[in-house]
Image (cartoon, rainbow, N blue to C red):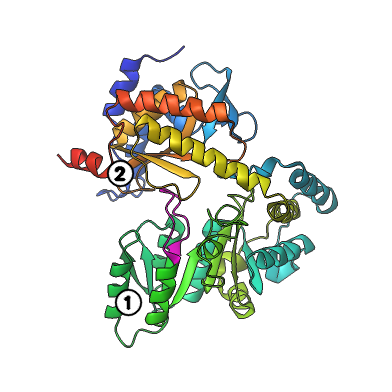
C-alpha cells in the first residue's frame, strides 16, 4: 500500500542532520548508534530509507534500473542518473567475456596479499596497461579507490611534511591527509590564491610538501585548474597529486584526463585513478615513476595488508581499458548526452555551473527539502544522487545527476520535465546554491 504524503512529510520534518549523530556526550560508545536508530526507524516507516538508501536492485546498474518497490514489493523500472559507469563498459560484451574466461581459469578470488603469495598475471597485465594508458613508467593497483588515496598519502607523508588539499576533495583524500601525521591544511574550493598563501607561509624547516586535488570534483563536477596547481607546486618546491577518478576515460580527447585536457602531460607527480567509474568495476591505482610505485608496494599499508583484486576483475578491467582506446564512440555518445541534459535543464530555468564533466548538480539547500524532493523524484520514476552531509557541507544539499553513454534522448528529456516540475513545486527552480544557503541561515 502506498504511503500518504502527510505521513512522509511529517517524518521528513523531524529528520535531523547526520551531523547530529557524529559524536555523543554519553560514556556509552554505542549511545549515538541508538539515537540514530530512532531516525532510521522513522525513515523505514515512511519507506524513505528503503527507496533512497537501501533500494533493492533486481538487475544491473544502467541508464534504466529495475528495482523492488519498497511500498508495493513489485518490480519497477526507473530512469537512473546515479551510476558512475560513464561509458557503460561494465556491460560491454568484450569486458564481460574477459571476466568469464579468467573466472573459469583462476577461480573467484585471490586470497592472499601480493607480497606473500605473489602477483597473478592478470594484475600484472592490468598495471602495465594502466601505466601505458596514462603515459607513466609504472602503476600499482589497490583494492579500491579509497584505499589508493589513503594508501598513497599515508605511505608517502610523514610528521614534518606539509600536505594541502582543496576543500571539496574526496573523503578518501581528507582521511589520508589527516591520518598521515603530516601538517595538513585546506584551501577554499578552486581558490589557488589561498593555496599560494598557505604554501608561502610554510616554515622553512618544513620537509616534503604535497598539493592534492581531485581532477574532476565528484560532488560538483568542476575541473581542477591544473596549470595553476602545477605552477604553484613548482614555485614552492612541492609535489602534485591529482585524483583522476572521474576524469579517466571521460575528460580529454582520448579520455586521458586532466593532463590531456590542459595539454600538460606528466603534470602530476602522483596520479591516482579508480576502476569504479568509466572502467566500470572496482579498485584503484597510483601511476608515477617506477621508484614511486616500488616504494608504495612496501610502504602503502592499504596495499601491503590486503588481498589482491580477483583475476576476473583484473581481466575485465584490462579489456575495458582496451575498449576505451579502441572505441571512442562511447565517449562521444556520453558527451552528446551530457550536453543535451545540460541544455534542457538550463532551458527549463535551472541555475547551472558550466558543463565541464558529465556530472550535473542542482542545489537543494536543506536536508529536509532534499528528502522530500528525492522521494517525489523516485515516485515519478527517476533515481539520482541525493547528496547531503557529510558528502557536502551541512545545509548545502544537492541533487547529483551523472550521465552515461547509454542514456537515450527521450530519457534525458523526461528527466528534465520531471526535475523542473518538482523543483518548481519546492521553490528552488532557478535558485543558486548561495541563495538557498542564505535562506537556510535566515
Give the quadrant of residue 288: bottom right
Q: Does residue 329 sit above or below 407 in this rendering?
A: below
230 or 146, which is in the foreground?
230
114 or 148, which is in the foreground?
148
Q: Which residue is mark 1?
A: 199
Q: Which residue is mark 2?
A: 396
Residue 102: image location, x then y, percent = 81, 51
Q: Residues within 10 Å of mark 2 (few under 14, many from 20)?
A: many
Question: Which residue of the protein is positioned furthest toward the left in this rendering?
Answer: 442
Give the quadrant of residue 174: bottom left
Looking at the image, residue 305 sits to the left or right of residue 96; the answer is left
Residue at (29, 32) in percent of width and height: 428
55 or 40, which is in the foreground?
55
Tell me where the magenta segment starts and ends, as one range. Answer: 213-226
199 or 296, which is in the foreground?
199
Count the marks: 2
Cα–Cα gap, marks 2 and 1: 28 Å
Question: Which residue of the protein is positioned furthest toward the right in this rendering?
Answer: 105
Magenta part, dominant SS:
loop
The label number, if any, that marks residue 251 in the structure image: none
Q: Residues within 10 Å of mark 1 (few under 14, many from 20)?
A: many
Residue at (63, 28) in percent of width and height: 58
User: Looking at the rendering, in which quadrant would you find the C terminus?
Assistant: top left
Q: Does residue 67 sit above or below 216 in this rendering?
A: above
**Is 221 part of what is drawn in magenta?**
yes
Amino acid at each position: 500500500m502506498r504511503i500518504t504524503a502527510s505521513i512522509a512529510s511529517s517524518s521528513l520534518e523531524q529528520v535531523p542532520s547526520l551531523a547530529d549523530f557524529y559524536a555523543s556526550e554519553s560514556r556509552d560508545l554505542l549511545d549515538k548508534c541508538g539515537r540514530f536508530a530512532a531516525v532510521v526507524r522513522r525513515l523505514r516507516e515512511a519507506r524513505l530509507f528503503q527507496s533512497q538508501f537501501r533500494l533493492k536492485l533486481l538487475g544491473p546498474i544502467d541508464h534504466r534500473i529495475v528495482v523492488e518497490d519498497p511500498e508495493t514489493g513489485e518490480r519497477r523500472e526507473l530512469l537512473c542518473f546515479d551510476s558512475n559507469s560513464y561509458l557503460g563498459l561494465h556491460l560491454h560484451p568484450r569486458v564481460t567475456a574477459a571476466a568469464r574466461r579468467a573466472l573459469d581459469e583462476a577461480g573467484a578470488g585471490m586470497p592472499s596479499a601480493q607480497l606473500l603469495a605473489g602477483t597473478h598475471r592478470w594484475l600484472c597485465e592490468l598495471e602495465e596497461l594502466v601505466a601505458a594508458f596514462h603515459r607513466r613508467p609504472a602503476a600499482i593497483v589497490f583494492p579500491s579507490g579509497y584505499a589508493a588515496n589513503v594508501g598513497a598519502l599515508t605511505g608517502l607523508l610523514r610528521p614534518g611534511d606539509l600536505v594541502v588539499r582543496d576543500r571539496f576533495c574526496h573523503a578518501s583524500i581528507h582521511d589520508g591527509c589527516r591520518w598521515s601525521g603530516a601538517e595538513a591544511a585546506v584551501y577554499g574550493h578552486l581558490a589557488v590564491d589561498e593555496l599560494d598563501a598557505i604554501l608561502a607561509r610554510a616554515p622553512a624547516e618544513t620537509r616534503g610538501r604535497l598539493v592534492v586535488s581531485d581532477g574532476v570534483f565528484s560532488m560538483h563536477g568542476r575541473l581542477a585548474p591544473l596549470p595553476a596547481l602545477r605552477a604553484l607546486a613548482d614555485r614552492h618546491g612541492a609535489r602534485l597529486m591529482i585524483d583522476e577518478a572521474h576524469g579517466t576515460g571521460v575528460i580529454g580527447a582520448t579520455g586521458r584526463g586532466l593532463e590531456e585536457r590542459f595539454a600538460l602531460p606528466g603534470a602530476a607527480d602522483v596520479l591516482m585513478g579508480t576502476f569504479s567509474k568509466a572502467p566500470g568495476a572496482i579498485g584503484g591505482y597510483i601511476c608515477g615513476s617506477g621508484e614511486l610505485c616500488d616504494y608504495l608496494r612496501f610502504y602503502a599499508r592499504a596495499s601491503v595488508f590486503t588481498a589482491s583484486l580477483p583475476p576476473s576483475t583484473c581481466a575485465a578491467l584490462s579489456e575495458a581499458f582496451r575498449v576505451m582506446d579502441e572505441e571512442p564512440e562511447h565517449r562521444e555518445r556520453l558527451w552528446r548526452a551530457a550536453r543535451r541534459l545540460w541544455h534542457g535543464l538550463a532551458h527549463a530555468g535551472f541555475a547551472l555551473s558550466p558543463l565541464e564533466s558529465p556530472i550535473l548538480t542542482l542545489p537543494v539547500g536543506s536536508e529536509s527539502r532534499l528528502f522530500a524532493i528525492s522521494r517525489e523524484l523516485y515516485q515519478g520514476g527517476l533515481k539520482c544522487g541525493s547528496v547531503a552531509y557529510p558528502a557536502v557541507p551541512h545545509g548545502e544539499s544537492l541533487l547529483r545527476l551523472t550521465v552515461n553513454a547509454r542514456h537515450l534522448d527521450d530519457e534525458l528529456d523526461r528527466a528534465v520535465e520531471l526535475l523542473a516540475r518538482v523543483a518548481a513545486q519546492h521553490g528552488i527552480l532557478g535558485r543558486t546554491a548561495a541563495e538557498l544557503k542564505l535562506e537556510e541561515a535566515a
